[in-house]
Structure formats: structure tokens, C-alpha cells
Amino acid sequence: MNASLHLNLLKDDERFTSSPIRPRIMIPLLTLLSVAGLGVWWLLLTERLSGAVHEKAIREAHCAELTPARNQVLSLRAREKEVRAALTQLGFYRASRIRFGDTLMRLPQHVPASIQFTELRVPPPPPLPAPDPALKVKPLGPTNLVEAVSLRIAGRAGSSASDEAVRSLLDALRQPAYTNLIRKAEIPKGAFRQDSARGPAARESILFEITCACGERRFK
Amino acid sequence: MPQVSLTDSFTKPFKACSDVIGLEVGAGLSEGVPAVRLRKSKGRTELVAAGFLDLPGAVPVSPGACDAQTWRLPAPFRAPHAALAIRSPHAYLRHSAGGHGEETADRAMAYRQAARQTAPEMPPLAAGLPEFQAAWAARLLPEGRRPTACSLQVAAAAAMGGFAASSALARAQGHAVALFVFATSTSLAAFQDGRLVFYREHGVGMDHLRAAISSQMGIETALADSVLEDTLIDPTPVIEPILRPLYRQIEISADYLLRRCKCQVEHFFVNGLTVGGPHWAKLFTRIMTHNMTFCSPFEGLERTGQAVRLPEDVEKRAPLLMTALGAARTVLEDA
């Protein structure tokens, strides 16, 4: 076995690498560049953050300036919505209006001479149910889409043939000339009676009532 | 498995060298700076490139003469690592009684030293180089460019290291005496079981032979090599007085090995001789009654790359590449 005769006089610090990439230069350089890169990144981040904070403050101030106007717009919109709802409701009322005039104009010709009307009226609709207290906005009108309508006729017949006269009037109301308005006409039970309230002289007078069910009132 | 810390892996990013170029600095050859590139692959050592590079290879002789020069090598010689063998009159290589080469050749000069126990019961072998020369040589190959220095050796140690790893010594079963002929000196090394057991340096080199031939035959020194090669003139009478003391030292060394180490030396090798080999061998046989074997530094190496077909003048001057090759091979063997 040969003993090496390598008597190396080169010092460790004189040994260099032949590679163009020198670790003892590249490592500190890369470290320095990394630190510098991080510093630049941190500066950019800080600057962006500062910009964002500044812009947030500007926008908040702008929002504060616009808030009264916005509230005003919102209240106007709410009011506009309310008015529009009222107008719509009014439109419904207009559309649901039932015209009694023409029908009632033709009624005198069918009323016998012995009959005197004491009342002719359209009874008001039954009261609406109490609104739901949970609702914030109270309805402007009836919430039902249809409403029953009736016509009440009351009077007295003063002759011996008062019965026939009342029947004649009832039949007239059932004629086609009235069916577009009056769907059903009848004398309620007990509504055909002697008029005893006016004394013996008026015992021949008969009081009567006719109830007519009219077409429904539609809110559409 | 050795533990390597993270710090070490960054500060010492050098793994085992497997591709090394050996350069002999300060050889003073007119051909250029001897350079040999070796690569170790799958346990075999390959010769990749060899030649003489046109570089300013003079070693500064004083600290004030150190210029800041850097070398850039041709592409075939750009191995990752370089082993520099320095030939300097101030350098020394000797067995050290002190153990770690703490003795200095010149107290007035700061020395960089290294020592190694080459064989049991033998004083360590110490090498020393003036600090300014070592520092100058370490800066020749700058960082970030191939190659960079991984080893700095004294020339004689590099040459011996190359021989110690050679196939010639292996063939001799590790028992041999080897001569390393340089310009101004000749190193004598004795090996037992492949270990260096004895080293001496003699102040007789090729330049002394050339000077003797020049002065005694009346020819220019530049023509001395042709006289040594020419069979028409026998220069033996001129060179014998110079070589005889050297051969006498070899005889003493062989006797020392026989007495001290009980080792009969039968193999005598000569390295670094470019001309006059037959005259050396003839004289050696006459004095020592043994044969002398001349070693080629490329012997036993597989060739690859540029070294497959080396220029003829490089092949002819191959012994002059002994030190450069030895420097590279020593690193490869030590890796």
C-alpha cells in the first residue's frame, strides 16, 4: 500500500471554487436581496394600506354628506309608494263602482199607484275585520277582493189589493231589465205586515220590504 | 461516513477531486509551462491533455517582485481543479527530525510548511516554500473560472508522488530506488513496499552536464543536448566525473536499504531524463552492475480526449512533464 506523498501547502482560505456561482458571495447576496425584497414589499404594503385607509376615510365622509339626502330620497320613495298604493286603491274603488242610477230611473214605471216607498237604500258593507297588529303598514282599503252588495226597498201599500201590488213590484224587479244589477229579489220572512203603528185608520195599509241581492263589487 | 456540517459545505464546497490539471510553475523551460490533465474514472487514471503552455511561469524571487498575474488556460486544460508544483531555489524537501517541518531553511524568510510520515520508524518528510511564493502561486488561478488551485506542492515532492503511483513502481513490487533528474539537482528516493523510506537531494542536474560538455568540448550550451544524443561523440569521459558521485550515493542508499530495511533493491528507475539516457545507463551498469530503467510519465495511463494524439514534440519531451503529472496524480491518489 502506497503512503501518499501529498504535501499540500495550500491554505484552506486559498481554496476557491471554479464555479461562476460562488456560495460565499451568492448566499450573502441572495440574503441581502431577499431582505431588500421583503423591505420593498413591506413598504408597498404599508403604502397600499395607508392609501386604503385614506380612501376609506374619504368615502366615509362622502357617505356622511350623502346620508341626509339619501334619507330624504328613501322617505320620498316610501311616500311615493304609499301614494301609489292609495291611487291603486282608488283605482280599484273606481273600477268596482256599481251604477244604480239607470236601473232606479226605470223603477217608477213598475211601481203601482197604491205603493209608496218609505226607504230605498244600499246598506253599507259589513265592517272589515280588525287589521293584523303585526303588520307595520296599515291597509288603505278593504283587503278582500269582492264585496257583497244589496238593495233594500221598504214601503207601504194602501189598497185592498196591496198584496198583488207588492207581488207585481217583486216580479218587475225580477224582469231582465234589472237582472244586470239585481241577481235575486225576495221578501224576507215577516217583512209583509199590517201597518198598526198609525192607528185604526191605516189598518188597510200593508208594510213590506224587498231585499235585492246585487252583483258583487270586485276590487281589481 | 464522515459528517459534514452545513457551514463546512458552504465554506468548503470541494469534494474529492477527480479531474485535475497539474502545472509546474518555475520550471524555466523554453517550451513553456508543463501542464498535464488527469482524470480518475471508475478507478482508472486517464490522461486527458498534456503539453507546454505559453504562460509566464517564472516564480518571483523576492516578496517585492510578486506581480498580480492570473492565468487563463486553453480549453483542453480547464479541469475543475489544479495542482501547482512550484520549483523554487528557496523551496526545500527533506526528512525532518522535528516532526512537522518546523525547521526553516532561511530564518529571514517566512515559510509555509507541511510534513507527512511516509513510512513507519522514519522521520517525516517535510516540504517548505517561502510564504510570498506560496501566496503568489495561490492567486494565479482566480475564483469563478476553471481551474482553481486545490493543491500547492514542492516540485520534487510532486514528481515523487507521481512515481509512487506509477505502474513502474507497482511492477517492482514497491521496492525500488528512483532518480528524479531536474535541471539543477537530482532527487534520490528509495521505496519499500510502495512507501518512501529514504529521500536525498543532490546538487547535480542536467544543467551541470550541459555546462561540463560545453566547457570541456568547447561548444555552446545549447548544443550539449545534441552531443548527448549523437553517437558520433562519446561524452562519457565528460559526464562520468559528474555522475559518479551521484551513482555512489545510489549505491550507499541501496546498501542502507539492505542493512536497515532488509530490502534487496534490484530496480533502479530514472525519471525526467530527456537526452543522454544510454550514457547514464552504460555508466550505471559499469559502476553498479545493475540495469537502469527509464520511466515515461505517461506509462500505464489510458489516454482520452486531446491526449489520444499528442504532438510529437510533446511525446518526445514527455519526461519534462513528470513534475506536472506527478502533482495531478498525487492529488488524485490522495482524494
Image: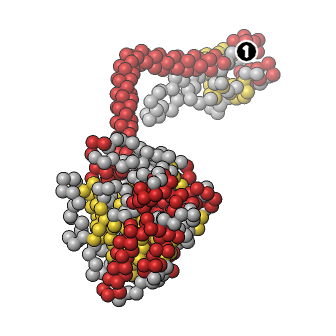
* Quadrant of res B117: bottom left
Q: Secondary structure at mark 1?
A: helix
The amino acid type, in three-letter code, at marker 1 is Thr
Which residue is label 1 attached to?
Answer: A103
Is A100 on the left-hand or right-hand side of B264?
right
**Residue B76 image offset from top left, x and y in percent:** 56, 52
Indicate how the structure is coloured in the image.
Answer: secondary structure
Pick whichever, B151 or A196, lies toward us.
B151
Pick whichever, A133 or B187, lies toward us.
B187
Is A191 on the left-hand or right-hand side of A179?
left
In this view, which residue lies farthest toward the left? B107
**Residue B51 image offset from top left, x and y in percent:** 54, 55
Q: Residue at x 53, y 58 (%)?
A: B226
In the rendered picture of this protein, how many numbered marks are placed on residues? 1
**Residue A52 image offset from top left, x and y in percent:** 38, 27
Pick whichever, B270 or A100, lies toward us.
B270
Residue B215 lies, with reference to residue A70, above or below; the image says below
Residue A156 appears anywhere in the view: no
Residue A205 lies, with reference to residue B64, above or below; the image says above
**Residue A205 image offset from top left, x and y in percent:** 64, 19
Is A163 on the left-hand or right-hand side of B207?
right
Residue B330 lies, with reference to residue B131, above or below; the image says below
